[in-house]
Image (tube, rainbow, N blue to C red):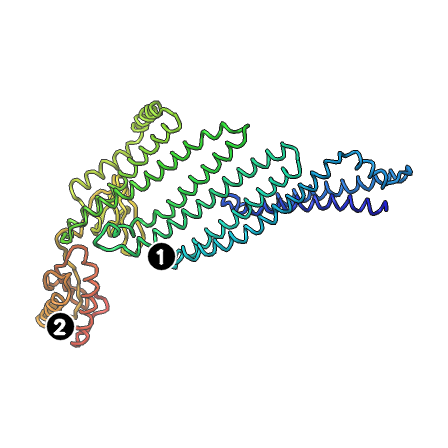
Amino acid sequence: MNLLIILVEVSLVIFIFLLLNWLLGKSIKLLNKVAIFRTEERTVRTLRRNITGILLLACLLVCILIVGVNGFLIYRGENLQQYTLMWIDRIPSGFWQKLSLGIAQSVGTLIAVALVLKFVDYGLKILNIRAKNLEKNTADDESIDAFFRDLNQRISTGMWLWAAISCTQFLSFPAVVGQYLYILLRIYLIIAVGLLILKAVEAIVDSLDALSIRYSSPDNLLRFYDRLRHLIPFLKRCLEFVIYVCMATLVVQQVQLIANIANLGPRIIKIIGIIFISRVLFEVVYLFVEEILFKERNLTDAQRSRRLTLVPLFRSFLQYSIYFTATVSILYTLDIDPTPILAGAGILGIAVGFGAQTLINDIVCGFFILFENYYLVGDYIQAGKSEDKVVEGIVEAIELRTTRIRHPNGQLQIIRNGDIGSITNYSKQYIYAVVEVGVPFDANLADVYKLIEEVGQQLKANDSDVLEATQVDGVESIGESNLLLRTLTKVKPGKHLQIQRVLRKIFTDILIREGITIPTSAEG
């Protein structure tokens, strides 16, 4: 009998341990659903193992204590059954009635919650199917499924937690236990509702994204949506931060010791709103300016190049202006007066300006390059102050300090505007494609001239980049075994290299076909 009593007491302790471990597992699963803790999954698992180990150690110590105390009583000759009954008799008789009623009410509550959750699960499945059928759009099915799956889990955990609180009342637990459990329930509901709102917002944004793509056309405003669609991930991230801040603010308000920190929540939300509005305003204004500049379809190449040159400059100016305004607004939101900061920055800027002559020189040269139209984006230029610093290629961007030039070999060359020096622009009005052809001394120059001019006429008819047919400029030089003829072909700006390659191939093919030997020492 003594052994049976000890076994019952130990079993009761083990049952309490298993119950606490089950509640711990449910709490950890809830934490894993929060995106903030999802990235720290390994840390959460380690925390659970540590807490489980502490509970297991406490359970083992209590079991050892029970066995030790009961063994001591047996050693003293005490009858464990009578000793236990004596302690039980000291308990008021009404306690057992209340305990029996509380247990019955608790069991009934748990059964009722289980039945209700079955109906909730069935109802949510029906709502899930109807929500997906509301718009025949399978692209949103995954988001809708995730929302209803999380909704089901949140309702289930919330109801079980409410059932646990009800059981503590039925079993007449101390009032402080119910108070803390109610705080835990409110915190859970805040987190659960916040996560559900997050899933709902994600599903709504995905649905609107899919609908905007579906109904966009060149005749409505949605034609701009594709160019602004890259803001969707940024919108999701901002909304996610706002929801998390709201959740944290409401949770902090539940804890009296740190309730004052909740005042920072609205300010953080304002800062997120300022950042989001600044980014959207920048993209929308930039898109509006591009639409105005390139709305005309009949732009000349010069007009298009000039506008392509101005767009990056306007983008930089707009970006700095909007972000500066956003920074000042954020400082005001944090109750920080930006006037002293701006005054100090102005004095610092003047001090730095005296030592930044190179920077000022680059900016001034950049303005003169644009104002006097030395070159534009898309022009093929050669520039540099000295032979060892010469750069050549197509202009990709003109900024206030630097010019970016793409070499024909592919490398990007960045040169300061102050180091541009002399400029050779191959993209103004027209340019000559100069090709030198070597022929032997005994060649009939009249026939060679005629062949070259025929090739030039044919190339002009077939290639729109050729403005005038090829002309022979004459004999450029007399070598040891050949004559070097110089040919000129008037082409569109920047097309000389391409036409030169084409002409060299055509001249080689036609001279070989006519039996004219090309000297090996010929240049060009």
Q: Is residue 488 visible?
A: no
Q: Position of residue 241 (x, y in %)?
A: 43, 40
Q: Is residue 269 left or right of residue 283?
A: right
Q: Is residue 506 left or right of residue 242?
A: left
Using the image as rendered, state which of residue 83 and residue 221 is in the foreground: 83
- Give the quadrant of the C terminus: bottom left
User: 10 Å neighbourhood of mark 2: few (<14), some, or many (≥20)?
Assistant: few
Kind of residue sitting beneath label 2: Ala
Q: Which residue is mark 2?
A: 443
Q: Is residue 325 visible?
A: yes
Give the mark nearest the N terminus, 1 or 2.
Answer: 1
Q: Is residue 206 left or right of residue 110?
A: left
Q: Which residue is mark 1?
A: 135
Q: Residue at x 58, y 48 (%)?
A: 112
User: Is the residue 361 above or below the residue 222 in the image?
Assistant: above
Q: Residue at x 34, y 52 (%)?
A: 209
Q: Secondary structure at mark 2?
A: loop
Dots 1 and 2: beta carbons under 8 Å? no
Kind of residue sitting beneath label 1: Glu
Q: Name the residue at the right extreme.
A: 77
